Amino acid sequence: MKKERKLRLAFERVKHNFPQIERQAAVSRVRSLWHSEGSIRNQLRQLGNLPLADFSDGQEVYAQYAALLDDVSRRVLEQYNRKNGTNYSFDTVVSGNRSEYLRSGILSVLLSNHIPGMVREEFRRLLPRFPQDEYPEARRQKRMFYLHLGDTNTGKTYQALLRLRQSRSGIYLAPLRILALENYERLNAEGVPCSLLTGEEEARVPGSKHLCCTVEKADLGGKYDVAVIDEVQLLADSQRGDAWTRAILGLPCPEIHLCGALLVKEQLTTMIRDCGDEYEFKAYTRLVPLQMEYTPVHLNHVGKGDALVAFSKGAVLALSRYLSQLGIRSSVIYGDLPPEVRRGQYDAFIRGKNPVLVATDAIGMGVNLPIRRLIFTELEKFDGESRRPLTSQEIKQIAGRAGRIGIYEVGYVACLDERIPLVEEKLSAEDEPIEQAVVGPSESILQITLLPLREKLALWSTEPEALPYYRKKDVNNELFLLDLLEPYHLPEQIQWRLMRVPFSPGNSVLLSQFSDYAHACFAADAKRLEKPVPEGQSCQQLETYYQQVDLYYSFSKALDLPIDEQWVLGTRDRVSARIRSALEKLRWSGAPDATHRRKR
């Protein structure tokens, strides 16, 4: 107290050497607690704003305040070290950060400058500088890539899968769960024992040496003679692209077939050369030409083989309901439909039971359907951030579904309005090439113990890539989930698994279920998760319930918890049947009798 009193008096003497207006401002600013770090920093800032060089007393008081600040800050750092089991040195933390320390305090410098600097050093030590170096097993192997690139609906994936069927062992990596399921069933039907693995299901076939899985589930430790990676242009997707990049760089497989759009060619060849591997390229062009229809299509004139494309679930159901009021049956496809229901909708269209298909742009990927005419109902889409025009590649991907090889000699493309010249222009436009592949964080990040996983991941996302043709993935969803898990103080290995559980955090029901599971498992130490129950029987409620069953399965798998697999399979079948029924009621409610309509 005596020291602080002497310091206060010295401070007052210094103030009297300055003009009255400055003295009054200074007096009003020093009325605070003298022993707190923040208060002392305030005094230093006040003194730093005065011309102390003209007064030896002022310089002496400034030095005394600086010494007092260091003393208090050392005690603050000691308390932090005791609380967190760390051993940070005051001199090391402040070194090189003196001005920031005087401005913000010791803990701010520690957490914002010193520790992040140490973590960056750990990044450089533990994480490979170049993405391809993260996969030493693949780098030890000489790999041959076959690039099947070109237009939609040209047999690219078909040709690659022929080679997969001929191999002693192989893996097919799909962009969608339904494509993995479709090829799993096809291979088994053709006498090639094949297993299935996605984030939501697993089917192991005894003796199988082939596997169909979603690209995120690729096991880089598996040994296969042939690999097929589908829709490789998605390596540029900001949220999922890292799964394709990982598979291309990391599969230790001697023969790899890449199927996708031509605009990804230069990016792929650059990555392959970096890996020291070789490639062959085959371009695919359409055998069935596309023909534009310049007259706008009226909905009451759609017929067998027509597919209408919209860009939201609501728009798809509204179109289907309107067609039903005209007496026209249609199959519907949108993202929330379970694969069993989606496949049933495909089959009804293929068999002609439902002559018309109404779908989102999901039909642009993978499944080949007997579409005679593709009709754009709109040319803009909401991409999660804003509503924007369709790109030339998106229009090509969707329009290219018209004109199935072996069924039609021509594929037709039309619009509901008069904008078909815009579609034609984009179909003939040269696509902007993909210039960057997306990379995700390595699991090696868990070896760094200086920061919580969330802060390490956020810091990793701001670090630039060493090569210009790679960029970091968007980790906002992961950071959001780690924020949600923070109260449970889970081991980082568990956090890492849970942030990769496949579900939509934008669905409040699923997000609440995820949070409840985290709380139940780690607050109450539960050994088995509770099964979800449906909230209602509407189509949307049933679709959400199906996703809840998927989350029950995926969360349990992530933590190796017991799963009632028979219940999962049975519930999925029952819910899918109810969704089909609800969908029919939803589309045909209020529709007139078709026979009566024709008589009119």
Image (tube, helix red, strand yellow):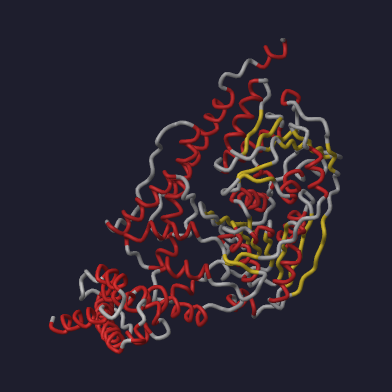
Residue 83 position within the rendered picture, expressed as x and y whole percent measured from the top left: 25, 74
The quadrant the C terminus occupies is top right
Viewer-proximal residue among 437 and 59:
59
Residue shown at 34% from the left, 84% from the top = 52
Residue 284 position within the rendered picture, expressed as x and y whole percent measured from the top left: 82, 56
Q: Quadrant of residue 253?
A: bottom right
Residue 599 position within the rendered picture, expressed as x and y whole percent measured from the top left: 72, 10
Residue 328 position within the rendered picture, expressed as x and y whole percent measured from the top left: 68, 24
Residue shown at 43% from the left, 59% from the top = 498
Residue shown at 26% from the left, 85% from the top = 61
* Residue furthest out toward the left: 2
Viewer-proximal residue among 416 and 513:
416
Does residue 567 appear in the picture of this structure? no
Does residue 158 appear in the picture of this structure? yes
**Picture layout, residue 497 above or below residue 99:** above
The quadrant the N terminus occupies is bottom left
Label total for image: 0
Q: Quadrant of residue 408?
A: top right
Q: Quadrant of residue 430?
A: bottom right
* Residue furthest out toward the top: 600
Viewer-proximal residue among 543 and 354:
543
